[in-house]
Each structure stands twice: as structure tokens, then as C-alpha cells.
Amino acid sequence: MIKMLCAYTEEIDEIDDAVNEILGQIDIASLLPNSAGIVSCYREFLETGVVRALADHLPFDIIGATTLANGTSGRAGNMLLCLSVLTADDVGLSPVMSEPLSPDNFKNPIADAYNRAIAALGEPPRLLIPFLPLIPNVGAEAMLKELEQLSGGTPMFGMIACDKNLGLVDSATILNGTSDHSSLAMLAISGNIEPRFFVAAISDSKVQKQKAIITSSEGNMLKEVNDMPLMEYFRTIGLTFGDGLEGINAIPLVVDYNDGTKPLVRAAYMVTKEGYAPCGGEMPNGGTLSIGFTDTMDILRTAERTVNDAISYGKNCLLLMPCLARYLELAADPFAELERVKKSIGGKPYHMCYSGGEICPVYGESGEAVNRFHNFTFIACAF
Amino acid sequence: MNETIDQIATTSYETTDTRTTSEEDLHHLQKENRKLKRLVQNYESLLQRNKETQITKANISAILLLERSQQELYMNLLMQNCPDIILLFDKNGRFTYCTDVFLRRARIPSFGLIGGRRLREVFVRFADSDWVDDVSDKFHKAFEESATLVLNEALDIGRDGNPRNYTITFTTMRDERGNSMGAIALFHDMTDIVRERERAEQASNAKSDFLANMSHEMRTPMNAIIGMTNIALRTNSAERKDYSLGKIRDASNHLLGVINDILDMSKIEANKFELSPSEFCFDNMLATVVNVIEFKAHEKCQSFRVEVDPNIPKRLYSDSQRLAQVITNLLSNAVKFTPEDGSVTLTATLASKEAENCVIEVEVSDTGIGISHEQQSRLFNSFEQADGGISRKFGGTGLGLAISKRIVEMMNGRIWIESELGAGSSFTFTVSAALPDEPPEDMALHTPEESCHDAYDFTGRRILLAEDIEVNREIVLTLLEPTGVTIDCATNGLAALDTFRAHPSDYDIIFMDIHMPEMDGYEATRRIRALDCPEASVIPIVAMTANVFTEDIQKCMAAGMSDHIGKPIDFGEVLKKLAKHMLRK
């Protein structure tokens, strides 16, 4: 069996106080033979050395990433360190971190990290929890494809590391005392585990009824819609952006692969000089595109519904990774979603942290889990 | 945010108050400084996020606004252009929207005149109040029960005396939460479909009636043939036998006429009806027709007059047989539908003439029972007579005029009627005929109708008859016996081939049946033509067959035959063919 023990601290500066606060919340004696800690934290926890100190004092590896805001065990905020310890007797846990990735070299480091994780497990994984860096010109989907190929389609649930800056410039992935802006960190899990995945982005009523067809794209690069250049299409639906094309990354693009899976939400990160938009994930040629609208009510409603669905699955461990765009949409009440989740979950252990991009499978027509990358989405994994 | 400001104030106050210089104080200051910095950065991030959120909200508002206006545009386009009548009602049964076609049909200048009004107030404009009450009640009940109601009604919405058939579907409109928001009534115009169905039913009924009529028309002469045959067999009286045979002949000819009408109609329906134009003498053709009709008119003590314009060219190029068929049909009808002591007149005039063709106008008028205007409109339809009772009283297939019309139209003409019930009728038609070149002298001398006195003596001539049916052979042998011709018989194509091959110069003509065992007529003809003897390529081979369609005749010609006689055999036709082919030789 596997269980989750949760702890948090707000103490960024006093390392000893922080470590003691964490140790005081975890019953080390109750740990089962295999343990690993999932950590999400405000960036400064790395700079002040709190994370390194924790890694030194805890009897298990910790793996995770920086985040914009997070919550666990009834506490939520944007300057927290949250730690959720997965401990099990019949589940293998293998955390790894890759060498730094670059646009020219990401496949080999990913393969190397994966192989090390599997070698340590000694058996094929049932679940991968990747924490991805944001690599310029390399979309998350490209990295996911590598992992997909290596693992033969093992379900993946994870995130792109983020921080308080929208450009994610200070984000980092973490493995014990090491953190890196460009490395992949991943927890491979094998054994007696049956994860179930839950995805909710925008309610159907908040998606534009007008549909368009992606007529030209290359991977995650969106070029033409309805046989029109992308910017021209946006103009036809009333979208205009400022000189710096500000705000384009805040428009949820709802993409339907038309293959029986649920539509996904993507963000356009920017606009290139050719008028193309690199998006958060693959924009399939022939896919259906429409614009989604988020608002506070819909964010809270979808979060609550997803959490309730995950809880009803009846498992011990709950990981929640909503998109940072949802946090931004909440504006002056940024913790509303965290609070709503805290209220819905009650006393069950959980780990919630905002992500710069979500990795979570969706279910096909015959029930098979298909790995997908999302934006603007609330993802949950119960196991 | 208030907590943040308080913290900043408190921190600043404490820092100002202590002002210590120990390492511990420095560490404390640095720590507080970091906290302050974090708070400020937090505040800056919040402001930045708010700014971007506003931009996003503005973009989203723009999209929503455009989407709403497009939805409104398309809704308006739907209302303006939808060919069906759609009426939208609110929860209280009042008009909220309708398609423009309803306003146009009902002659309502604008929706403003009916918007907000109840169904009853609007529908009484074009329907009686009982119907309106009934439909309103039904709509109301369907709305209450959230049921879908379908009605078929004839409504004269335009009040122009032309009611149209509608299928009306009434159903409740619900929003995504299932709340009833009103109702929609869709009026789908089924008039064209209903009319087509009625036409199809009428046509089907007419065909059923026709079949019943044809059955009667065919069984009646068959009954006479069978009955009279039995009488002839039983009686020893020669006079009675002659009488019976005469009746059998009349009944057979009548039956043949019925069969020919049915076959002609089948060809017309199948678009296979064709003309076979040839050069002929108009006067001779007319004389042949008149001879037959004169006899019938005489039997009814009717006066029968024929007036022929002397300007009509003597020789024409057209299908004389079909032209005769039309004139015969009109004259037969005139005699049939004119009582005793009445009169029938045939007038043929030259309507126009040009270098290469002319238009002949033929009028047949009578002092008969006449035809009402309503009946006239159906007269030229196939399967219909003016009155269904006509066939019972006067007999006839009812196809003659439809066939005549087709023939006339194929000759680039038209046919029309002028008649009053009880005051006689006048049927007139025009046809276009080509003018042949001056006939060659030999053709002028030897056309069958001009050399008829020589045609029937074929003494010294020899015919090879290939026919597998014994009774058919007997008919030919018996009928041709008076002409002095010698006839050798072959019971199949192979025997005919062998006989001819053995004595090619003995024969003047071959009559070849088509459907025979061992070798059919086509193959026998091909093999005869391929024989290595001079007679093989020139001997006339005349097909004798019941296959009378154009393609059948073409098949005969393609096999190498020279001519064609249809079965049942017309003795006169046989003599003409013999004269044509044997006298030339």
C-alpha cells in the first residue's frame, strides 16, 4: 500500500526553524520501506538553503519544482514550501534528475535519466511524475514524446516548473539539494499502484460555439486557421492585441483532436515574426479550434468538481497541479482556488501546486489513457 | 494586502526604534529586509497580474461581443431566408419571433403587428375560429405535457383561395437547464408532395382501370373467336360456318387492333416509338383509309364526306402508315360517337408549302355526342377516355388519341379539338412532310399501288418458306395458292440453308421466320449470303416475324435480310412484298 504524509513551512530565512517545522509534521517512525518526498516551493527556499537542509536531514529523496503558489494539509499560499512524502511497502519509488537540457540536446539526457530511474526500480514503471524545465524553442510535448517512446506509453502526471515571474525565468526543478533551471526531474513509480487521472479546464458553456479548423501547424507551432494566417483569423473573431501582442498567452485555445478524446486547452506563448504562435502543446492539423473564456466562478467550479471526482475514486494519495493561468485569472483573490480545494478535500492528504504547463493523460473512447499536455487546466491524480 | 501594509509599517517603526549595531541586530535587519522585499515584490506581481488580467478580460469581451453579434446576424438571416414557416412563442403563448415567409404568406406588413400577441389573435386572420380554438387547445396541451405535437392541415394562410397542405410540428423549447422557455411551431409545406402523391395515385388508378379495360377488350374478341370457332366446328351448315368464320375474322382484327394499340403505347412509354418515313401517294393513302370508314359509316346510315385540297402535293415523304393510323383513329371515333343518320366530314388542306417540305392540315368533324371542356382536358392522356363509362358503352382502349397525339407531334405537328357537349366535335391536326425529289421513271411505273393488277399472278415463281410452326406454313401456303406461286418449305434455318445451297437458282424469294430450332433466321440469312454463288447475294430474303420493334427490323437488315413482314401476317402486305421484290427481278 502507499500513503501520503504532508508537511509545510513558511520559514524561508531560518533554515533550522524550517527543517524543524517540517520534521515536526512528519512521523518518521511511520515511514514504510520505500519513501520519496514531492516538494513544491517558493523560489527563495532554494536560495536560502532550506531545501538543501531538508534534503540533508530527511531520510528519503525529495523531488519537485518551484511554483507560483501551493498548498497542503490545510495551508495554502504563495510563499510556502510544501512537502508530501509518498511512503509504501509494495511500491517502488525512483527519483532522478537529468543533465541540463537544451534545444540541441534534450533527447539523450532524458533517455539517460529515464534509464537510470528504471534501473533503480528494477521493473517497468506504472506511473511517471515528471517536472519539466521550460526550454526555449522546445515545447513540453517534444520532451513528453521522448518519455512516451522510452516508456512505451506509461501514464505521465506532472508539470512545467514555474515561479512568480510569468516568464518562468527563476523556475527550477529540484532533486534533493540540487536545483536546476534546465534539468528534468522525474519520479518513476512501479508496483501496486492504480492511478486515475482527472482533467477539467473550461466548462463547455464557456467555450465559444464558433469552431474553426487548424489548417496549418507544425507540432506546437500554430500557423493557419481556416486557411487564414493566424493573426488574420484572430481579427475575424474580434481578437486584437497590443503592439507587444500582450495578453495572447492568456487566451485559452480549446483544441479538439477529433479522435474521441476530450478537447484540451492550450496557451499561445507568443507570436513569432512570421505571425505563428508556439503553443503549449501540439496543435494537430485538422483539429478543431475554439476560444475559451475563464472567469472566477468557472475556475472554482471546475476545481471543485475535479477534486470531488478525484476524492470519490477513494485512494490515499492526491496530487493536484492546476495551471498558473487560473491563479492569474483570480486576480485580487489569488488563493480562492487553493481555498476551495482545501475546503473540498477536508482532512485528506494532498499536494497542490500551480504549474507552468500540465501533463496528464486523458481517456480515449475505449478507456485507454492517452498522455497529453495541457494549459489552463486543473489536473488531478489519485493513487 | 492590508496585512502587508501593516507589516511594513510595523517593521519600519521597529527598525527605527531599536537602531542596534550588533551582528544579531544586523541579521534581524537583513531578515526583515528580505521579508519586506518579498512583500513588495509580491505587490508588484499582483499589480502586473491585474494589468494583464484586464487586457485578457478586454480581449475576451471583444470576442464575446463579436460572437453575440454574429449569432444575432445568423439568427436574422435564418428568419429572413428560411423557406419554412417557423413561429416562436414565449411561455405565455405569445409570439416572440417568426420567419419572414410567414409574414409574406399571411400578408402581415411587419412583425410588430403580431409580436406579443397570442396565437388565437393571429391565426383567426386566415382560419376559422373553430379550427383556431381546436389547434390552440392542442398546442396548449402539448406545451403543458412537454410533448411534441404533429398535425397535418390544409390552410389558406394567404386567403387567396389556394390552401396549402402543411405538416405542423409543435414542441416546447427548453434551455440547457431543462427550463421551459416557450415553444416552436414549424409549418412544413407539403403541398407539392401531396399533389405529387395524388397525381401518382390517379395515374396508378388510371393504369389499374386501363388494365381492367384492356383485359375486357382482349377477352371480348377472344371469347368471340373461341365461341365462333366452336360453333363452326359443330355445325354442318356451310352458311353458319361462313357466318362464324366472318365473326372470327372480325374479332381477330379487333384483337389485333387492341394488341397494336397496347404495343404502340408501350413503345411510347419506353421512348422507343419511331417513324419509318418513305415516299408515298397521299391520295392513295387517304383512299385506303376512307374505304374502310365508308363501309362503317354506311352501316350506321351516316353521311360521310371527304374534301381534299388539290394543292396538296401528290407525293410526300413521311410515315404513311402512321399518318393513316391517325386519320383512321379520328374517323373511327367520329363514326363511333355519332348516332345513326349523323354526318362525318374529312377535310385535308395544304396549310403551307416551302421548297423542301409542306404542312398538311386534316380536320375530322362530326355531328356526334360532343365532349365537355372538362373532358377535353383529359382526352389526349393515355389510359383515359373522356368518361370512364365510354369504354363500357362504346368500347375501345382509350389509347387511340394519345397515340395519335404522339404521332402528330413526331411529325412536327399538333392536334386539337373543338367541341361542345351534345353539339358534335371537330378534331384537327397538322403534320409536316418532306417533298421528295421527282421520282425515277421506273419507280413511278412499278410502285406496288400502281401496278396492283399484275402483282397477284406469280405463276412460274418459286418461294422458299422457312417456318417451323406448321399452322403458319399452312396459312402462307393456303393464302398464296391463288397466285400460282410454288412454295417449298423448310422447317428450320439449317434446312433452308441446305435447300437453297442445293438449288440456288430455283428460288425467287425466301420468306424467313426468325425464331426456329437448330438455326435461327438471322444465322440462316448470314450463311446464305456467305454462299459462294451469284444468287446468294441478290436473292430477296424477307423476314416474317412477330418482332416488330425498330431494333428488331434493324437486326434483320444487319443479318442481310431485304425486307420485313410482321406477324400476324397481313395478306395484302405479303402480296405487296412479293410484287415489290419479284417483279423488280
Image (cartoon, rainbow, N blue to C red):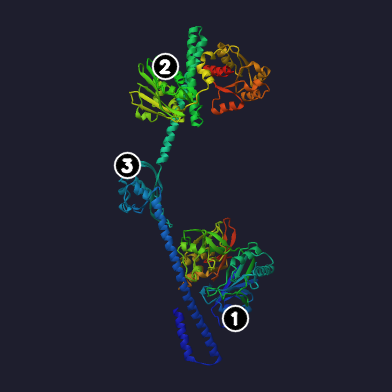
Q: Is residue B581 visible?
A: yes
Q: Amino acid at mark 3?
A: Asp
Quadrant location of residue B342? Answer: top left
Residue B294 numbered mark, or none: 2
**Vertically, is A372 above or below B97?**
below
Quadrant location of residue A7? Answer: bottom right
Classify mark 1: residues with Cα within 10 Å, few (<14), some (14-19) or many (20+).
some
Chain identifier of the residue bearing label 2 in the image: B
Q: Nearer the viewer, mark 1 or mark 3?
A: 3
Q: Position of residue A294 (x, y in %)?
A: 47, 66
Judging by the rendered image, the residue that carries numbered circle 1 is A49
Residue B82 numbered mark, or none: none
Q: Amino acid at mark 2?
A: Glu
Q: Position of residue B461 (x, y in %)?
A: 60, 14
Q: Amino acid at mark 1?
A: Gly
Chain identifier of the residue bearing label 3 in the image: B
Q: Is residue B29 left or right of residue B462?
A: left
Residue lying farthest to the top in this orientation: B237
| Closer-to-camera residue (B540/A312) | B540
| Closer-to-camera residue (B337/A94) | B337
**Vertically, is A355 above or below B271?**
below
